[in-house]
Image (tube, rainbow, N blue to C red):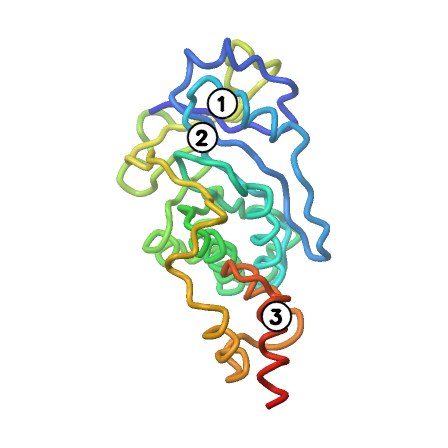
Amino acid sequence: MFGIDVSENNGVINWDLVKGQINFAILRVGWIGNHNNHTVDKQFERNYNECKRLGIPIGIYVYCYCNSEDTAISGGSWTIERLNGKSFELPVFIDMEDSSISNLGREKLTNISIAFNTVMENNGLKAGVYANRNWYDNFLNKEILKSKYATWIAHYGLSGQAYQGEHDMWQNSSSGNINGIGGSVDTNYLYTDLISSTGINPSSTSTQKTNEQIADEVIAGKWGNGQERINRLTSAGYDYNTIQKIVNEKMKH
């Protein structure tokens, strides 16, 4: 299957023209950083609504500047807020390629990817990792990531189906020409059947433990302290203030 990935850098897209040329689109929701400076892509809402109007299957990607598991969890929680009530046919991918975090080492960068994707999965979404060939070979443990998530690799200048059987999706070019998009656009080939309905239903808590059970776990030290506790409870779909109130009441007795 042939598709594109887009962001505000592609301007205002004429999706009516684009639809007949692609099988799917991956939309950037924004980027996540280290000081709660997470930022939404200016075209995300419009791109999402247009794809939904036209029935174009979509996935999501989030560009990552996070330098720790905790900031990746915070970014994941922010992403869930942006995606709340929306539905997707392809995974949410964390985009791992920024030079500002490349010195953190393979293990740390892999764990940052896992931390973000765990938030996605805890909220019922399919998760994946995007990186270029250099990052997959030298900065991430690709075998661990491939065993857990969908993987999407960028590598230009190759012909044929270069990564079929190794990765789920291949970004083959950054200079694609699609009618309805001004300038160049990233193009991709999807090899595996990742397309199926998924999304966030904020009222769906059937798989969650009760607030009382979680409060007991907090008291037992299973959810950490301070900001770590806030991040972990939020990423798992619990309301921190509600849980903390129960904890405070229990600790009085």
The answer to which image quadrant residue 159 occupies is: top left
Tell me the SS state at disc 3. helix
Q: Mark 1 and mark 3 in contact (Cβ < 8 Å)?
A: no
Tell me the SS state at disc 1. helix
Q: Measured from the top left, where is residue 165 in percent x and y?
A: 26, 40
Image position of 192 with respect to 252: above or below: above
The residue under label 1 is 51
Within-10-Å neighbours for mark 2: few <14, some 14–19, many 20+: many
Tell me the SS state at disc 2. strand
The residue under label 3 is 228
Q: Measured from the top left, where is residue 161 in percent x and y?
A: 31, 29
For badge 1, the amino acid type reads: Cys
- Give the spatial CA distance, label 1 vs label 2: 7 Å
- Give the spatial CA distance, label 3 vs label 1: 36 Å
The residue under label 2 is 58
- Give the spatial CA distance, label 2 vs label 3: 32 Å
Q: Could you say which is closer to the camera, residue 229 or residue 143?
A: 229
Question: Which residue does the image show at 43% across and 35% down from the upper left?
Answer: 88
Q: Mark 2 and mark 1 in contact (Cβ < 8 Å)?
A: yes
Question: Which residue does the image show at 54% across and 28% down from the upper left?
Answer: 48
For badge 3, the amino acid type reads: Glu
**Residue 139 appears in the picture as rendered:** no
For badge 2, the amino acid type reads: Ile
Which quadrant is the N terminus positioned in? top left
The answer to which image quadrant residue 182 occupies is: top right
Q: Measured from the top left, where is residue 75 in percent x and y?
A: 61, 53
Q: Measured from the top left, where is residue 80 in percent x and y?
A: 55, 48
